[in-house]
């Protein structure tokens, strides 16, 4: 089976709901200035800055993931701030820096590019 046939055989339209607690991580999204200058202010606000993003599994260094029409790469290890059980002190969320890779037009393009980047082809 060719790669394009495998992509066509997947059904992205059938979304599945997973009942699993999310892992919330503060992601710092860094977009290159040359791309930021080409984007509208409304789109730029969605993808540049720090956002609390939910993951199904802990992201690892070098992993690629889609967010708001763009593909991002986890630049380093997740920095965690542990707290004791039932402590009343401040509890910070884990933090990770994300690097811009490229944008995509639709889910099919994103899916095929994510497979290429992950080495699953």
Image: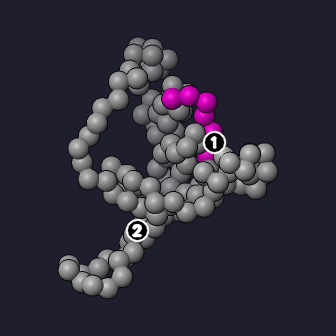
| Disc 2 from disc 1: Cα separation | 25 Å
Measured from the top left, where is residue 9 in percent x and y?
A: 39, 16
**Where, quadrant-wise, is the C terminus in this rendering?**
top left
Measured from the top left, where is residue 68 in percent x and y?
A: 55, 43
Q: Is residue 106 a member of the stretch shown in magenta?
A: yes
Please rate how many residues cluster around mark 2, counting C-alpha atoms within 10 Å: few if below 14, some from 14 to 19, many from 20. Answer: some
Residue topped by disc 2: 94
Range of residues picked out in magenta: 101-107
Question: In the image, what residue occupies the spot 57% across and 39% down?
Answer: 69
Question: In the rendered view, does 104 fall on the left or right side of 21?
Answer: right
Question: In the rendered view, does 81 fall on the left or right side of 105?
Answer: left
- Is residue 15 or residue 119 the one in the foreground? 15
Q: Is residue 57 above or below residue 9?
A: below
Residue topped by disc 1: 102
Question: In the rendered view, does 72 fall on the left or right side of 84?
Answer: right
Q: Is residue 98 above or below residue 7?
A: below
Measured from the top left, where is residue 19 in percent x and y?
A: 23, 44
Q: Quadrant of residue 39?
A: top right
């Amino acid at each position: 089976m060719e790669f394009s046939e495998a992509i066509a055989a997947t059904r992205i339209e059938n979304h599945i709901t997973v009942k699993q607690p999310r892992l919330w991580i503060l992601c710092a999204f860094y977009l290159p200035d040359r791309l930021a200058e080409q984007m509208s202010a409304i789109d730029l606000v969605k993808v540049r800055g720090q956002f609390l993003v939910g993951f199904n599994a802990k992201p690892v260094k070098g992993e690629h993931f889609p967010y708001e029409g763009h593909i991002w790469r986890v630049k380093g290890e997740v920095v965690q701030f542990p707290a004791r059980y039932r402590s009343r002190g401040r509890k910070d969320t884990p933090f990770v820096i994300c690097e811009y890779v490229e944008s995509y037009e639709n889910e099919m393009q994103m899916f095929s590019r994510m497979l290429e980047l992950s080495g699953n082809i």
